[in-house]
Image: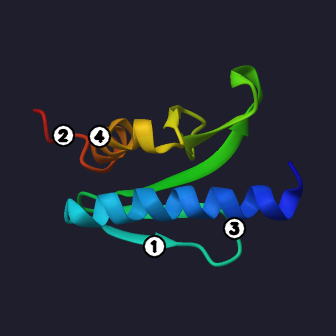
């Protein structure tokens, strides 16, 4: 896949995740120059999510946290899974 097309697809997938998180009441911001999503969570919590190719999964796009944790495949079938995972990162003590 060529780089401009790949970057466009990354941004589209991050946009879809952003819309889903907004529907759950989260403040989100997409970076202009990088395929990066920043989610405002609990007090002082900012979660950064990237969309990148995962070579060990056949080159599929995956959502990944800033600390390198693979969140979920970046496709419609796994969007809910990604939302749940990001919400857990954004509000880490919600289950306590």
**Which residue lies under the disc numbered 4?**
84
**Which residue lies under the disc numbered 2?**
93
Q: Position of residue 21 (x, y in %)?
A: 31, 59
Distance, label 2 to label 1, CA atoms, is 22 Å
Distance, label 4 to label 2, CA atoms, is 14 Å
In the image, 89 versus 9, the foreground residue is 9
Vertical arrangement, residue 35 with respect to residue 86, above or below? below
**Which residue lies under the disc numbered 1?**
29
Q: Mark 2 or mark 4, which is nearer the start of the sequence?
A: 4
The quadrant where residue 27 appears: bottom left
Vertical arrangement, residue 23 with respect to residue 29, above or below? above
Distance, label 1 to label 4, CA atoms, is 18 Å
In the image, 96 versus 38, the foreground residue is 38
Distance, label 3 to label 1, CA atoms, is 12 Å
Q: Residue at x 29, y 40 (%)?
A: 84
Element under disc 3: loop
Task: Give the foreground label among 2 and 1.
Answer: 1
Answer left or right for 84 relative to 58. Answer: left
Element under disc 1: strand
Tell me whether the residue at label 1 lies in contact with that at label 4, contact meaning CB atoms closer than 8 angstroms: no
**The C terminus lies in quadrant:** top left
> Mark number for residue 34?
3
Does the rendering let one see residue 6? yes
Element under disc 2: loop
Q: How many marks?
A: 4
Return the residue found at the far left: 96
């Amino acid at each position: 896949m060529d780089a401009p097309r790949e970057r466009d697809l990354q941004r589209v997938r991050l946009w879809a995740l952003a819309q889903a998180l907004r529907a759950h009441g989260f403040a989100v911001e997409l970076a202009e120059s990088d395929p990066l999503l920043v989610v405002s969570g609990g007090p002082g919590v900012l979660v950064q999510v990237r969309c990148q190719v995962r070579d060990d999964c056949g080159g599929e796009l995956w959502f990944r946290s800033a600390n390198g944790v693979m969140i979920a495949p970046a496709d419609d079938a796994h969007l809910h899974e990604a939302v749940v995972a990001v919400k857990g990162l954004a509000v880490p003590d919600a289950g306590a």
